[in-house]
Amino acid sequence: METIQIHTTSKEYPVILGAEALTALAPFLKEHLSNVTKIMIITDSNVGDRYLNQVKHQLGEYEVVTHLVPNGEKAKTFDVFYDCLTAALQEKLDRKSLFIALGGGAIGDLCGFVAASFMRGVPFIQLPTTILAHDSAVGGKVAINHPLGKNMIGAFYQPEAVIYDIDFLQSLPAMERRSGFAEVMKHALINDLHFYQWLLTDIDNLQTITTEQLQECLSKGIKVKESVVSKDEKELGIRAFLNFGHTLGHAIEAEAGYGSITHGEAVVIGMVFALRLSKKLLHLQFEQQEFLEWLHKLGYSTKVPSGLYEEKLIDRMKQDKKTIGQVIQFVLLEEVGKPVLYKIDENVLLEELKQFMKEESR
Ligand SMILES: NC(=O)c1ccc[n+]([C@@H]2O[C@H](COP(=O)([O-])OP(=O)(O)OC[C@H]3O[C@@H](n4cnc5c(N)ncnc54)[C@H](O)[C@@H]3O)[C@@H](O)[C@H]2O)c1
Ligand SMILES: O=C(O)C(=O)C[C@@H](O)[C@H](O)[C@H](O)COP(=O)(O)O
Ligand SMILES: [Zn+2]
């Protein structure tokens, strides 16, 4: 088991990562949150059916209630958010109560926002169950979606701890492995050429990846994230680099309908496009073909899903949180490990996107 300490301006907390990390939960509560009155676990049925009893067993001496929400992106809606708050009030949670997010990024984002809002803020702990959550559980971005844009309603609100038991990852379906691994690639590409090269040479199958390799990927990814959020918790500057691949990725998710493509699979398409722009506009030296072949071998599609239109995607990008005064901004790379935020003219972007969608659909 490994502990990675996250330092942000508002809070410091540990990520406890490894096999059987769940056993660290009760000792953590005893040491740091000894006066907890009640615990509400927010989870979904995919995760709850498999792991809820194990978690409850660890919490034997506490008063625990569970609130079940829809699986996946359907959890990040106003209605579900409202229902969580209603359940918390009905269960008489108070300011000394604790929320636990048991699940992937959707559960973490929702539960974190519930915790941030309930009585103006009560503590929460993240128990991630997906690869993707090495990203989402760290750094304190919590949010729900609006039909007009991804993660539009939310807060920066840090957890008390992230307890990341990698035994939970064994039941992840292939599509969710791909989704999560996309954020591992992102962390490598924006921060560390050696990390990227190691991924490219050592990881060729996400189903047979070893526990050691997986833990190494998660640990390295979390350290990249820590190095960014410790300097810029609220995205006043460099935190935007963590949005590499997301300008187009989020537009695809919203335009396709939340949940019809996984977050990571949309981000992969966004990264491919951002790398292409980086080569064209910033003369990035990068073996794009090698990257594409690796992605295809791992099972990713690098095409924008059919039925989506360039103009509509551009409209979505104009509502991206990085867009200021209607000017779209992309995270591009000058080099692998050297990201920049780049303002891009809408007409240039439209032409590039048209070309990309034409070539990638061949
Ligand atoms: N806050 C952040 O910084 C941040 C970072 C990246 C992504 N996100 C958000 O995270 C969300 C995606 O998270 P995700 O990829 O973890 O997906 P998810 O939480 O939607 O989970 C994906 C699916 O896998 C199931 N599942 C989860 N764990 C499982 C397990 N161990 N075994 C079997 N099934 C399991 C879930 O029930 C769900 O159906 C998106 O909404 C994205 O916007 C947030
Ligand atoms: O932590 C961040 O900052 C990120 O950008 C991480 C992203 O992987 C994540 O998808 C995040 O939720 C996107 O944030 P948003 O502000 O663009 O909604
Ligand atoms: Zn993301």
Image: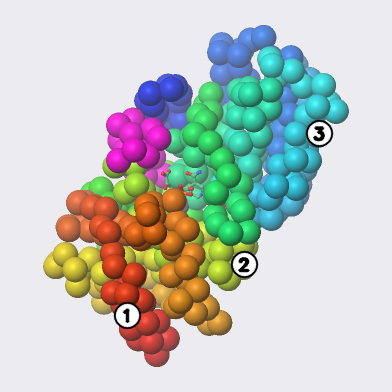
Q: Earlier in the sequence, mark 2 or mark 1?
A: 2
Q: Residue furthest front?
A: 325
Q: Residue 236 magenta-drawn? A: yes
Percent x, y of residue 108: 59, 41
Q: Is residue 249 above or below residue 225?
A: below
Real-space Cα separation, disc 2 to disc 1, in angstroms:
24 Å
Residue at 38% x, 87% y: name it: 358
Checking the image for residue 257, the label placed there is: 2
Q: Three-letter amino acid code at disc 1? A: Glu
Percent x, y of residue 264: 48, 60
Give the camera-side residue of 343 and 43: 343
Q: How is the image coloured?
A: rainbow
Q: Is residue 66 left or right of residue 308?
A: right
Q: Residues within 10 Å of mark 2 (few under 14, many from 20)?
A: few
Give the camera-side residue of 189 and 58: 189
The span picked out in magenta is 218-237
Residue at 33% x, 83% y: name it: 355
Q: Residue 136 magenta-drawn? A: no
Q: Residues within 10 Å of mark 3 (few under 14, many from 20)?
A: some
Q: Three-letter amino acid code at disc 3? A: Ala
Residue at 42% x, 86% y: name it: 361
Give the residue at mark 3: 87
Residue at 34% x, 47% y: name it: 240
Q: Please state, as top left, top right, bottom left or bottom right, where the N terminus lies in the image.
A: top left
- At mark 2, the secondary structure is loop
Real-space Cα separation, disc 3 to disc 1, in angstroms:
49 Å
| Prevailing secondary structure of the magenta residues | helix
- At mark 1, the secondary structure is helix
